[in-house]
Amino acid sequence: MPGTSAFHRPSRRLIAAVTGISLAIGAVLWLDLDDSRRQAVENARAVSDNISRLLSERLDGSVREVDFVLRDLVDRIASLPSIAGAQRAAELGRLVAAKRATLPQASSLAVLDPWGRPMANDPPGDEAERSYIGAFAADGSLDTSTQAVFGGAYAAPGNAQGAALIRARAIRDPGGRLVAVVAARIDVSIVQRELADLELGEHRIIAVTDPTLRLIARRPPMPDAIGVEVVDAAMRSLLRSLREAGRGSGAMRSETGPYFYYARVGEFPFFIAIGEARADIMAEWEKRLAVYGIAVAVIVSLMFLLARLVDKNFARSAELAARLVAMESASDMIVIADLEGNAEYVNPSFERTTGLLKGEAIGTRRAIFGLEEADADAALAAAASGQSWRGEIAAARADGEGLIEEVTIAPVPGPGGEPVRIVAVLRDITERRKLQERLERLAHYDSLTALPNRALFFDRLDSAVARARREERRFALLFIDLDGFKAVNDHYGHDAGDYLLFEIARRLRAAIRDSDTAGRMGGDEFTVLLDNIAKPEDAEAVADKIRSSLSEPIDIPAGTRVSVGASVGIAVFPDDGNDGETVLKAADSAMYTIKLASGGH
């Protein structure tokens, strides 16, 4: 019948359009689900990577700080005049005690002869582990050793099983013969404190092991497991593969479900293991899968219902098709737009996330492309050619607050197969970016004082050297060691000590220019980089200003007013050295000379 044929032509076009939109939405959702699954695993690995990198840098920095002091102690012992007997022993004792005072993370510092007998140690006592001496004697090219040791000799409060990290350096004569060894013992509790400072998820675990898989530290804590070999087969397999392949990090999923990530601590023989349950990683993805499954079921049901009702009311079936596309229940933002990018529909999640009402978004390109017109042209060109497009776009909420969106756009084909619309799925990733920036800051700034840490300070020092060479000018470096800090810390507790360090950092920043850099090397040692000074006297003036500021009394939380002093060593580039390390060493040496001359006050 002609009338029936005329009616069914638009019906077939409508069904074809609905089918095309459904397939397009299904394709977008499938791509989004697949991408979100990979992203969930990648995000978990990225967080574990950032946590392990942050912990690795902290532990690496602590051991390197100890090694820096050991190198300096080796140099100072080598430069001692040719004296013998009690006078040499007394001088060695003074050197060891002075250096031990600069290492709050070291529980002992010792100089041993080639047979392992103490020549000088602080605090006085014997060393329980000396296997590294045999290694130094057997291998003339070996100058350093780092190892974890376990046993009752190292038992301490909070470390009942007894564990410590030993860092040692050999002292050789010009012929390569071993004449002495300097060694520092780092109590393993410093590793446990570093773990306690990290922000971990509810079910994430983190452990530090030696190369033989013996546990050094763990969070959540397991004191009885310290020194015991790890028994999880997946963790053992991953660590062995990393060690044998010589790689610094890796990840795998164990047969029982958890994902494990391993990373080596710098160049030292320690490994960090991080584990996270699969249920935690995939929880949000599984919720999304359930919502999308319901949405697809609704789409299919509505499509069949629309096909049955199309003969009764064609206009109503078009309205149902629009609702089909809407995806009202989706947690992500969904926008349907014409081929010019002008929005025709936004879902409730879009309104909740952006604060824009439908009336404000409909008819504009802002709904999809925010502030990125260049990305709009690329995305629309891809859609016009029948291709999908993915990217990140900077947008803004209705109140002007910045928003970063992850956008997936797919074309909607018409009856002839040509694109007639586009469908966009937008996800708010602003908080993920903020977390990445926060982790980046934690990796470069001291968490207590907010000053640049050792890694960032050395980076700025290298930049200052390059700039000074290029512009043929001077800069100065101040090496500051607090006098009296240990007494305050021991008497009033760590909270008072932390507050004192925070206040010292604030006064340091106030005493220098915005163009200068103050950093914390660790413990109660600070450095200041004075960029572009005209003459050395300028650095002396700043040092006097700093000493005066730091000597002012400080009211600590214990309700007591305390005072500390500061020994300040000054070095000028290029007068005292032609590279950053030499200038730093000169400033440290100057500070050490001042501290010895003043008796540590």
Image (tube, rainbow, N blue to C red):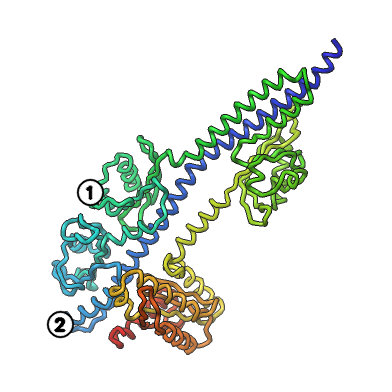
Give residue 4's position: percent from left, percent from top: 82, 13
**What is the spatial separation of the Cα atoms under label 1 and label 2, in whole angstroms?**
45 Å
Q: Secondary structure at mark 1?
A: loop
Q: The C terminus appears in which quarter of the rendering?
A: bottom left
Q: Relative to 313, does residue 295 appear above or below in the rendering? A: below
Q: Find the residue positioned furthest to the bottom.
A: 537
Query: Which numbered mark, 1 or 2, is in the foreground of this view?
Result: 1
Mark 1 or mark 2: name the one nearer the start of the chain. 2
Horizontal side of 363 relative to 258 (left or right) equals right
Q: Which residue is mark 1?
A: 228
Identify the residue at horizontal 86%, vertical 14% (top origin). Answer: 3
Amino acid type for the residue under numbered disc 1: Val
Give residue 583's position: percent from left, percent from top: 42, 78
Residue 69 is labelled as none
- The answer to whether the residue labelled 1 contacts the one labelled 2, judged by CB atoms less than 8 Å apart, is no
Q: Residues within 10 Å of mark 1 (few under 14, many from 20)?
A: some
Q: Which residue is mark 2?
A: 84
Identify the residue at horizontal 68%, vertical 23% (top origin). Answer: 303
Q: Relative to 280, does residue 13 appear above or below in the rendering? A: above
Give residue 447's position: percent from left, percent from top: 43, 65
Q: Secondary structure at mark 2?
A: loop
Amino acid type for the residue under numbered disc 2: Ala
Q: Nearer the viewer, residue 137 or 486?
A: 486
Q: The N terminus appears in which quarter of the rendering?
A: top right
Q: Quadrant of residue 588?
A: bottom left
